[in-house]
């Protein structure tokens, strides 16, 4: 199909015609590009399943979506909010899924869709009771779909250990802008149960384990600093429990609650704000018109016009960072129009949503990028633009949030970080540190995005070293560069489906000499004239199966690159932890070698003195001299190994590392849980990153067969050509200008290419078989590794206990040899043998501890769950030398 339009133009006015035709061609190509490309995605669902299921006290969140849609999830607000990050999802589709979602009302308060960063969407699940993550998994249900499940359960951290009786030391009040905070200070066993009474308005705080007399003493210095509270009363409930009653001037809502533990001191924060039920709807009740956000000199100003007929109260929260505005007496639907149309133009304000207070009034919540104290709130009467009416406007001023800033500005720094609700109380008997067993259900799966941040302090700690390693380790940086390169596969594949345009220009000079002409109209002689050809060609692929398959391959390749990058981070964490523990082991060996040399030196000097006094023999002296020389050699070797271990750390982080403190705490090792190697193997086959990468490689190889087989199919392209031929003269007369416009569809049917396509198909088949065999090899290798490491961790628990007993036994034997030598029983050789056996047993035990810790990390890496959380746990364990202990 081809249309050709040609005309001869002798004037320069043809430029406007060419410009018009060019625009027509460009618009035609754009329309066809949209029609043939974008329509293939229309109506395609990106999420096949999203539901919430109640399983007793547990809540299971299930999301099945296309690969690349799920970006991460996090738990915030003391376990009351789950935020799911989604990419490349249509807002209407997601909103429809949430609207039709069956919500377990006993566990879930509400589900909302919020805008995220860079066009992403967030699903906010509000949970009634504080919860913690019990399990999280993500598996590839098919090459194009992944299934993510999150299991939440009651926060066990809110339970008080029975071994710690509760005590209360003080109660004080901290008035804030828009709210009032109560701080209860006691010990680690302090628990507060909060409830409200509306007739008359009261706040009840039940304190299990706090006797009435102790409560009375704690409130002796309590001072009323806010008009919301009018009185305080202490009443006994039982012999060991009591109730704290606050009389309120009006009904209130619980807006903040948190607990923190600092050493043995526990603190509980209770934040209150005024509350009231919504009034009967009438015309006199206003409706929020709009929301405006301005920024001026480090301050954010929120302007909310149209609040007549209601009472507004604003306050801020710090975890998560929020500005909350309660419209007391209003129903929530009065806020929905303004909140629904609100689009933040300031990066400090992420989104707005509508909730309800405890008594049902409307609440407007603004998500902020960081902590921001409320500076002022004012309500003013401002005339309308027409001057015919007066409008009530609420103006709020906040300090501009500093992105990523933590801390609580509103509570005086008492709750400056996410609180550790309840810490485990360890047995004070030796060993003083009890390591929790490595579990399949531990948090830290590689898909989670809300991982602990690497702090800048503790430069010689593991997390500080990890921060340096992430920036300086050549192997990890190489993996990051490889990930960046592989990400370009997708735009390159999509480029083959987009229009291409080319411009050609040709300038020709013609010189001719006519010697003789039979036609008198052609004069003889020499002449020359130039000519110019300009051509613009636009091509849009319409049907090209190979490019469509290549896009699918590129999507899988990008996902594979992401998995490989996460695997590189896991490998970096394991290398860093292994090198750090190797450094600690080298330091221990250095200390043991030095101690053994010093002990041997003293015995050698004693042997010399005994020989001079006639109590010893020359044989004993030579024996002691040989033993002393061996201990000197061991110390030199230990020093060299310590220096090499320091260089091992430098190889990863790129900088020299100063000296470190040794790990001197004894601990009990725990076997893996569940205590079934088959469960660990099954988890590894589903979650191991290397296995997942091989599975994606197999799928890419399968698609490569389809792509090469598509070489037998025809290709259809839309082609548009615009050309101009401009000549100043010719053999036949004066010059001319010719504009040509060609618009058509080009069909290309491959018939024979010398057997190239058949050869490429055979090559793709062989490569698929290669990928299949490599995948099978990876599965077998992973299963073997998991079984081996599992048994190493399991056996280490028994080995450590046996080696600990050996150290104690050799210590006792050494003391007995020394006492016997002092009493004249035995000789100095037996004493030195006892020293050698003691230091050998201690050296074996200390090395076994580090092997056990490394094997725990290797086991988690094998099942694909190793993360920065595990490195932080290891760092906390290594820092536990500050605890009171009896080190070996």
Image (tube, helix red, strand yellow):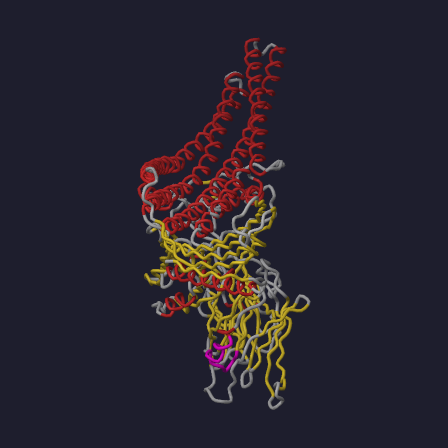
Magenta span: 327-338
575 relative position to 713: left or right: right
- Determine which quarter of the picture holds residue 621: top right
447 relative position to 462: left or right: left
Residue 546 at what x, y percent from top left?
A: 37, 48
The N terminus sits in image quarter: bottom left
Residue 196 at what x, y percent from top left?
A: 47, 75
Q: Is residue 649 magenta?
A: no
Q: Is residue 881 above or below residue 609?
A: below
Q: Residue furthest bottom?
A: 388
Q: Is residue 336 magenta?
A: yes
For the question of whether residue 683 can be seen, the reply is no
Total marks in image: 0
Residue 52 at what x, y percent from top left?
A: 35, 63
Q: Is residue 244 above or below residue 201?
A: above
Compare residues 399 and 747 and report the one nearer the observer.
747
Residue 50 at what x, y percent from top left?
A: 36, 62
Residue at left offset 61%, top offset 67%: 373
Compare residues 79 and 421 and report the one nearer the observer.
79
């Amino acid at each position: 199909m081809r249309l050709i339009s040609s005309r001869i133009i002798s004037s320069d006015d043809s430029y406007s015609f060419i410009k018009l035709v060019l625009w027509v061609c460009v618009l035609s190509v754009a329309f066809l590009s949209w029609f043939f490309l974008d329509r293939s995605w229309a109506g395609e669902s990106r999420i096949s399943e999203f539901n919430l299921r109640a399983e007793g006290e547990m809540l299971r969140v299930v999301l099945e979506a296309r690969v690349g849609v799920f970006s991460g999830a996090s738990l915030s607000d003391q376990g009351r909010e789950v935020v799911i990050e989604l990419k490349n999802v249509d807002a209407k589709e997601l909103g429809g899924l949430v609207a039709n979602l069956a919500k377990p009302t006993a566990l879930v308060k509400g589900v909302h869709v919020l805008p995220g960063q860079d066009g992403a969407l967030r699903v906010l699940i509000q949970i009634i009771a504080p919860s913690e993550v019990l399990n999280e998994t993500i598996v590839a249900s098919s090459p194009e779909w992944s299934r993510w499940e999150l299991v939440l359960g009651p926060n066990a951290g809110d339970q008080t250990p029975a071994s710690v009786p509760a005590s209360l030391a003080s109660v004080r009040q901290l008035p804030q802008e828009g709210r009032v905070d109560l701080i209860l200070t006691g010990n680690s066993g302090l628990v507060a149960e909060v409830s409200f009474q509306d007739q008359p308005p009261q706040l009840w705080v039940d304190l299990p384990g706090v006797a009435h007399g102790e409560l009375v003493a704690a409130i002796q210095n309590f001072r009323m600093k806010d008009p919301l509270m009018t009185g305080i009363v202490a009443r006994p409930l039982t012999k060991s429990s009591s109730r704290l009653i606050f009389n309120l001037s009006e009904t209130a809502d619980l807006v903040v609650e948190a607990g923190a533990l600092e050493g043995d001191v526990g603190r509980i924060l209770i934040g209150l704000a005024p509350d009231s039920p919504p009034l009967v709807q009438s015309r006199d009740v206003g409706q929020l018109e709009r929301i405006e956000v301005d920024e001026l000199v480090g301050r954010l100003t929120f302007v909310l016009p149209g609040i007549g007929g209601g009472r507004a109260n604003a306050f801020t929260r710090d975890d998560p960072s929020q500005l909350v505005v309660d419209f007391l007496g209003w129903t929530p639907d009065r806020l929905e129009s303004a909140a629904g149309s609100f689009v933040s133009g300031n990066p400090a304000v992420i989104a707005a949503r509508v909730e309800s207070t405890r008594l049902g009034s409307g609440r407007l919540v603004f998500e902020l990028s960081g902590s921001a104290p409320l500076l002022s709130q004012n309500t003013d009467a401002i005339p309308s633009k027409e001057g015919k009416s007066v409008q009530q406007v609420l103006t709020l001023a906040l300090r501009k949030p500093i992105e990523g800033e933590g801390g609580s500005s509103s509570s005086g720094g008492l709750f400056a970080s996410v609180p550790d609700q309840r810490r485990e109380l360890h047995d004070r008997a030796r060993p003083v540190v009890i390591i929790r067993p490595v579990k399949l259900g531990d948090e830290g799966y590689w898909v989670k995005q809300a991982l602990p941040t690497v702090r800048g302090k503790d430069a010689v700690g593991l997390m500080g070293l990890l921060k340096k390693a992430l920036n300086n380790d050549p192997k990890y940086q190489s993996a990051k560069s490889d990930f960046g390169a592989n990400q370009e596969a997708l735009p390159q594949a999509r480029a083959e489906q987009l229009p291409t345009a080319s411009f050609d220009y040709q300038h020709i000079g013609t010189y001719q000499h006519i010697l003789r002409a039979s036609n008198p109209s052609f004069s003889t002689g020499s002449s020359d004239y130039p000519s110019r050809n300009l051509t613009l060609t636009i091509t849009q692929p319409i049907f090209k199966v190979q490019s469509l398959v290549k896009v699918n391959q590129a999507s899988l390749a990008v996902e594979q690159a992401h998995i490989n990058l996460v695997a590189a981070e896991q490998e970096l964490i394991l290398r860093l932890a292994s090198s750090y523990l190797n450094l600690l082991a080298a330091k221990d060996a250095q200390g043991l070698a030095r101690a053994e040399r010093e002990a041997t030196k003293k015995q050698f000097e004693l042997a010399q003195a005994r020989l001079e006094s006639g109590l010893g023999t020359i044989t004993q002296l030579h024996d002691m001299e040989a033993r002393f020389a061996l201990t000197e050699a061991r110390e030199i070797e230990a020093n060299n190994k310590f220096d090499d271990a320091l260089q091992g750390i430098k190889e990863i982080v790129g900088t020299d590392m100063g000296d470190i403190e040794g790990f001197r705490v004894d601990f009990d090792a725990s076997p893996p849980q569940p205590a079934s190697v088959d469960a660990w193997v099954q988890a590894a086959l589903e979650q191991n990153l290397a296995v997942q990468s091989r599975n994606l490689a197999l799928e890419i190889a399968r698609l490569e067969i389809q792509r090469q087989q598509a070489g037998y199919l025809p290709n259809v392209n839309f082609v548009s050509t615009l050309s101009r031929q401009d000549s100043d003269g010719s053999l036949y007369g004066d010059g001319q200008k010719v504009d040509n416009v060609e618009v058509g569809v080009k069909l290309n049917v491959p018939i024979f290419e010398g057997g190239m396509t058949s050869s490429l198909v055979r090559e793709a088949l062989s490569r698929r078989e290669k990928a299949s065999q490599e995948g099978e090899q990876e599965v077998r290798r992973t299963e073997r590794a998991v079984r081996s490491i599992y048994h190493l961790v399991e056996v280490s628990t028994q080995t450590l206990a046996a080696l600990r007993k050996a150290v104690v036994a050799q210590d006792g034997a050494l003391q007995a040899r020394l006492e016997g030598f002092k009493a004249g029983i035995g000789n100095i050789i037996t004493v030195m043998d006892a020293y050698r056996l003691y230091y050998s047993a201690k050296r074996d035990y200390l090395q076994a501890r580090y092997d056990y810790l490394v094997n725990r990390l290797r086991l988690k890496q094998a099942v694909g769950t190793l993360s920065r959380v595990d490195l932080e746990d290891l760092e906390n364990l290594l820092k536990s030398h500050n605890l009171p202990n009896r080190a070996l």
